[in-house]
Amino acid sequence: MCDYDKLFDNNKAWVSNNLAADPDFLSRLSADQHPDYLYIGCSDSRVPANEIMGLAPGEVFVHRNVANLVNNTDLNVMAVVNYAVVHLKVKHIIVCGHYTCGGVKAAMQARDMGILNPWLRNIRDVYRLHKAELNGITDEEARYDRLVELNVEEQCINILKYASVQESYIAHGYPEVHGWVFDLKSGLIKDLQINHKEKLQQIQEIYNLTDKDWHSLF
Ligand code: CO
C-alpha cells in the first residue's frame, strides 16, 4: 500500500537535510538556473536522472518520455531542446536510454498497441534502419539490448537535425551530443562514444539547416 501523505513528510525532511548540509541551499535553489547539461531520458521510475549522475538541483535540465525519444513532431521535446540550446546555452546534451526498457520491448512486439502505436513507431523505424544488424543477432536478449543502444544513437542523430543545435555548434563549439545507456543491473552508465563531429558531418549532407538563403530556390 502506498503512503501518499508520506510524500509531504519526505519533502520537509529533504529541505531540513539539505539545509543542515548547506545553509545556502534554498537561496541557491531559488536563484537563476545555469545548467551545463540537458538530459533526455526514459520516464522509467528506476532511472532518476540527477541521482545517477550525482548532480544537484540546478545542474541539469531534464526531459523524460517513454523510451527517450526525440521526435520530429513532438512540440514538447522541441521546446526543451530549443530552450536549453538557445537560452540556457548548455554545453552537453545527453540522451540516456536504459537496458530492459519497456518501451523498446513493446516496440519489438509486432502487434497493435492502440494509442502507443504512433509513439512506438519511432522505435520500430530505428529497427527498420538497422534491420540487417539486429536480425543477425540470434540471442533475443542481446538483440533487445542492441536495439536500446541503436535507439539512443538515432535519437542523438535526431538532435543533430535541429537548426539551433547545428548553428550553436558551428558558432561556439557546443553543445556536444552524447549517447548513454544506463544498466540497471550494475547501476553504471555506459557511454556509447558517439562521435558528435563525425555524425554531424554525415547528416549535414542531407540535413544542413544552417544556410538561410532558401528564397533563391524558388
Ligand atoms: Co524505458
Image (cartoon, rainbow, N blue to C red):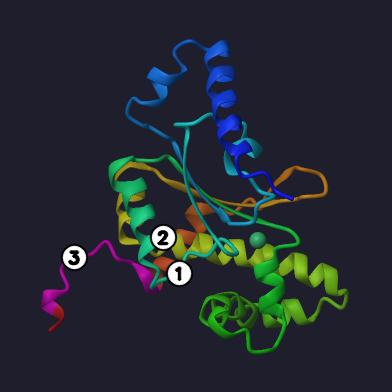
The residue lying at 55 percent from left, 26 percent from top is: 12
**Dot 3 or dot 2, earlier in sequence:** 2
Report the magenta residues as a range: 206-216
Q: Is residue 147 above or below residue 64?
A: below
Q: Is residue 209 magenta?
A: yes
Does 13 sit left or right of 87 as displayed?
A: right
Q: Residues within 10 Å of mark 2 (few under 14, many from 20)?
A: many
Q: Is residue 31 magenta?
A: no
Question: Which amino acid type corresponds to the residue marked 2 in the rendered image?
Answer: Val
Question: Which amino acid type corresponds to the residue marked 1 in the rendered image?
Answer: Asn
Q: Secondary structure at mark 1?
A: loop
Locate residue 67: give its quadrant.
bottom right
Q: Residues within 10 Å of mark 1 (few under 14, many from 20)?
A: some
The residue lying at 73 percent from left, 77 percent from top is: 133
Disc on res. 212: 3
Q: Marks 1 and 2: in contact by CB < 8 Å?
A: yes
The residue lying at 57 percent from left, 64 percent from top is: 66
Give the farthest residue toward the right.
139
Would the CB of label 1 be found within 8 Å of ligand 1? no
Disc on res. 63: none
Q: Give the CA separation, mark 3 to mark 2.
A: 23 Å
Disc on res. 77: 2
Q: Which residue is identified by label 1?
A: 71
